[in-house]
Image: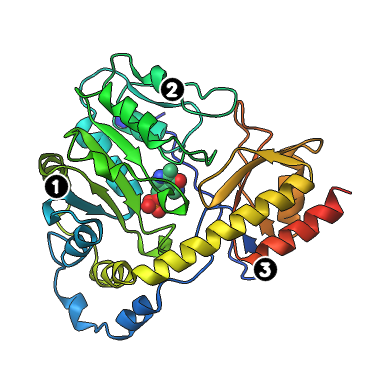
């Protein structure tokens, strides 16, 4: 080992789901939306000129921040935007989790949390989900340096009722609590109504799932203006222009089309409920997902075998060889046609 390597900030990086290059695969492995973004996004893209690229974009991410604030009935100063919610969450870790005490999150959850904790040297403790893979609010009553959990949780898909979310926040008013609502639009109730009551609450959402724009990388946090100001101070200390012009313009167009967003989200919910029926008949069991994916285990066939067989057939789902979840598959909800091809394959394979 070279001497300089002693001074390297070493981390084991997050491993994202595969992005296969072939076009003809059925991609149910990274919780993308199977429908295109709103036609208003296509229209806005057509109208974009290269002249907008010549100049630096808006420092305060206008008009996107205004549009998001308008959509949720907030003031622009209550919204922080970033390059996907991954960027927003990383900024939150860096800004708010500095007490030296361990932050708390579930043992089975978004596998980026421990990576950010490691990279920023934030101590953390994982609280075990119960045997039904549910979060137990009492596990978050102890002294800590901050709390973060997704709702619905990932990769389990299960939703914590708003009262239980509030219970966690109410017991943690001396630290920042982050509710990661990447999947909230597929049937959950957002904790946004609580941001006036709790000045330590941040609600984080994304354009990657319910707004079909994972490739544009737009995420946002909503909270009281003081929290947002602290976040912006840290962001501006890295890079003043995190949001590129295309993201600002096209994200704004997406938010404006409420009807399309509601229609595509409803379609995914309907397909998810049908998928539950089909998979149950094929011998799978799973929690009651309120997200755009199911976390399923099969009565007899090991998850890893199904995962590999599906991949051979050009159907990508997600599998983790990790404690407690190594016999589960996370299956993103695609279009009805894509799901039908999945069911047809499984019907044959599991015979
Ligand atoms: N939070 C959760 C729980 C997620 O599953 C994801 C998607 N991988 C993200 C945040 C980040 O999504 P994005 O950066 O695309 O907004």
Residue tagged 3: 337
What residue is rendered at 12% in x and 61% in y?
59
- Residue 33 visible to an observer of this rendering: no
Q: Disc 3 versus disc 1: distance between alpha carbons?
A: 43 Å
Q: Mark 1, residues whose alpha carbon is within 10 Å: few (<14), some, or many (≥20)?
A: some
Task: Name the residue tied to disc 1.
Answer: 232
Q: Is residue 278 visible?
A: yes
Going from N to C along the chain, the mark reached first, 3 or 2, is: 2
Label 3 SS: helix
Identity of the residue furthest to the front in this view: 163
Q: Is residue 199 above or below residue 209?
A: above
Q: Secondary structure at mark 2?
A: strand
Q: Do the numbered discs 3 and 1 sit on residues whose CB atoms are within 8 Å?
A: no
Q: Is residue 238 left or right of residue 292?
A: left
Q: Kindly report the distance in space between the C-alpha atoms of the residues bearing marks 3 and 2.
A: 39 Å
Judging depth in this view, the residue of 85 and 244 nearest the camera is 85
Residue 231 lies in quadrant: top left
Q: Name the residue that disc number 2 marks.
A: 126
Where in the figure is residue 120, as x and y percent of width and height? 29, 31
With respect to residue 104, does 284 lie above or below? below
Query: Disc 2 versus disc 1: distance between alpha carbons?
Result: 28 Å
């Amino acid at each position: 080992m070279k001497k300089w390597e002693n001074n390297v900030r070493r981390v084991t990086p997050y491993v994202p789901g595969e992005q296969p290059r072939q076009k003809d695969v059925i991609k149910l492995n990274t919780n993308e939306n199977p429908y295109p973004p709103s036609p208003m996004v296509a229209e806005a893209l057509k109208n974009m000129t290269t002249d907008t690229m010549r100049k630096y974009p808006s420092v305060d991410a206008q008009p996107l921040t205004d549009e998001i604030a308008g959509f949720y009935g907030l003031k622009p100063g209550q919204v922080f935007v970033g390059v996907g919610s991954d960027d927003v969450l990383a900024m939150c870790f860096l800004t708010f989790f500095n007490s030296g005490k361990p932050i708390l999150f579930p043992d089975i959850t978004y596998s980026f949390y421990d990576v950010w904790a490691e990279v920023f040297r934030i101590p953390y403790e994982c609280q075990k989900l119960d045997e039904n893979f549910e979060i137990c609010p009492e596990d978050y009553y102890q002294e800590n340096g901050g709390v973060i959990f997704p709702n619905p949780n990932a990769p389990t898909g299960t939703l914590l009722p708003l009262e239980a979310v509030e219970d966690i926040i109410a017991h943690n008013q001396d630290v920042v609590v982050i509710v990661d609502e990447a999947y909230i639009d597929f049937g959950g109730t957002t904790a946004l109504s609580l941001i006036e009551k709790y000045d330590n609450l941040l609600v984080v959402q994304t354009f990657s799932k319910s707004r079909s724009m994972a490739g544009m990388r737009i995420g946002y946090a909503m909270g009281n203006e003081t929290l947002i100001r602290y976040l912006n101070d840290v962001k501006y200390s890295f890079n003043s222009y995190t949001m590129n012009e295309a993201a600002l313009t096209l994200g704004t167009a997406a938010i404006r089309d409420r009807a399309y967003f509601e229609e595509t989200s409803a379609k995914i919910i309907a397909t998810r409920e049908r998928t539950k029926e089909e998979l149950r008949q094929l011998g799978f069991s799973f929690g009651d997902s309120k997200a755009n994916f199911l976390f399923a285990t099969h009565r007899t066939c090991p998850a890893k075998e199904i995962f590999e067989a599906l991949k051979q057939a050009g159907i990508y789902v997600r599998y983790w060889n990790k404690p407690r979840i190594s016999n589960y598959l996370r299956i993103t909800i695609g279009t009805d046609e894509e799901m039908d091809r999945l069911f047809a394959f499984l019907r044959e394979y599991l015979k």
